[in-house]
């Protein structure tokens, strides 16, 4: 009997900025697009959008730009689980969500150091188990300086089948866009790091110029574009259209939004805009 493929509603491993809370709106909007299109995920991140497209349209060609090397983290899930299991054993009698101090902290650090010396530690995933909520480190040296908390995950991670049938590349988004901008029946998924939000786990630092450059991929293309009300990108484009000869890439686009909560006193609005150009999609 054929095993039913698992459909993930969140990335298999922690990833800042994944669109798990936007999947319902995204899948509904996706039904307006062809099932045989080429979907190019320019800022693949955790790959959740690519996975979702492939689960909705199994016959579509989906290209996931893994610029942050999430695939390496997936390929090392067994090592990550082994490390988490070791921490789980050390902290088995330790109060949940409490600060890790004394000899127990020394044992936790020693466990991580052993894994580090063994050649691989997924520090982003590890951070979610022993650091305060939403805090991340990317190295052993940084971890040693942090206050640790017992937030260890109770079950192991699994990414089996997550990227099945998806073409994975790792390129500058501009190069990838250039490779496919003239492709018939192509849809671009555009989810860059948000302006004015924490992009600490991304490889590179983004300036305003970088965010504006991204808008060029929306001109005359079929797209899904994600932003937030913190960026003010939509208002900026409206101003540009009014005050300059330039056009607004969001004119005529459909808009979906939802409230996203960071913590008890901080929230923002997540926004998805999507648009089809009838001359190059069918």
Image (spheres, rainbow, N blue to C red):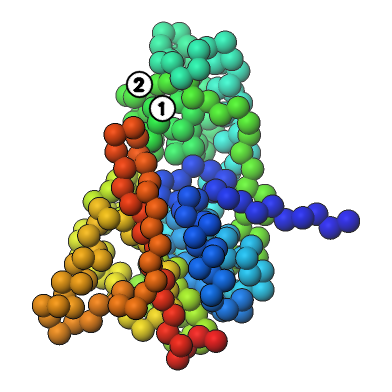
Asked whether residue 180 appears in the rendered view, the answer is: yes
Q: Residue at x 19, y 82 (%)?
A: 246
Which quarter of the image is occupied by the N terminus?
A: bottom right
Q: Nearer the viewer, residue 214 or 90?
A: 214
Q: Residue at x 18, y 78 (%)?
A: 241
Left or right for 6, reference 81 = right
Measure how far apart labels 1 and 2 are at the Cα level. 7 Å
Residue marked by disc 2 = 147
- Say which element carries label 2: loop
Considering only vertical position in the picture, is 10 above or below 101? below
- Mark identifier at residue 131: 1
Q: How many C-alpha atoms fall within 10 Å of the one at disc 2: few (<14), some, or many (≥20)?
A: few
Q: Nearer the viewer, residue 225 or 159?
A: 225
Asked whether residue 114 appears in the rendered view, the answer is: no
Q: Which residue of the protein is positioned furthest toward the left in this rendering? A: 243
Which quarter of the image is occupied by the C terminus?
A: bottom right
Left or right for 102, reference 74 = left
Q: Position of residue 72 (x, y in %)?
A: 53, 50
Q: Which residue of the protein is positioned furthest toward the right in this rendering? A: 1
- Mark identifier at residue 48: none
Q: Residue at x 54, y 76 (%)?
A: 33
Q: Position of residue 35 (x, y in %)?
A: 61, 76
């Amino acid at each position: 009997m054929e095993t039913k493929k698992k459909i993930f509603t969140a990335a298999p491993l922690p990833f800042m900025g994944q669109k798990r809370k936007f999947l319902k709106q995204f899948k509904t909007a996706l039904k307006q697009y062809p099932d045989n299109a080429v979907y190019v995920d320019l800022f693949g991140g955790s790959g959740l959008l690519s996975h979702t497209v492939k689960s909705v349209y199994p016959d579509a060609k989906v290209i996931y730009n893994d610029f942050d090397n999430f695939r390496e983290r997936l390929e090392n899930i067994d090592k990550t689980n082994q490390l988490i299991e070791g921490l789980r054993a050390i902290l088995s009698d330790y109060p949940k969500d409490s600060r890790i101090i004394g000899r127990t902290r020394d044992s936790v650090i020693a466990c991580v150091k052993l894994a580090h010396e063994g050649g691989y530690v997924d520090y982003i995933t590890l951070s979610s188990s022993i650091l305060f909520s939403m805090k991340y480190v990317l190295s052993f040296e940084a971890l040693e300086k942090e206050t640790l908390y017992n937030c260890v995950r109770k079950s192991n991670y699994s990414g089996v089948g997550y990227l099945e049938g998806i073409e994975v590349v790792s390129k500058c988004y501009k190069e990838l866009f250039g490779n496919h901008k003239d492709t018939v029946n192509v849809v671009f998924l555009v989810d860059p790091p948000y302006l004015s939000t924490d992009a600490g786990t991304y490889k590179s630092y983004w300036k305003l110029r970088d965010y504006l450059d991204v808008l060029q991929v929306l001109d005359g293309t079929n797209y899904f574009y994600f932003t937030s009300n913190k960026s003010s990108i939509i208002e900026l484009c409206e101003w540009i259209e009014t005050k300059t000869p330039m056009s607004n890439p969001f004119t005529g686009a459909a808009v979906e939004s939802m409230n996203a909560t960071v913590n008890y006193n901080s929230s923002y609005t997540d926004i998805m805009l999507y648009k089809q150009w009838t001359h190059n999609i069918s």
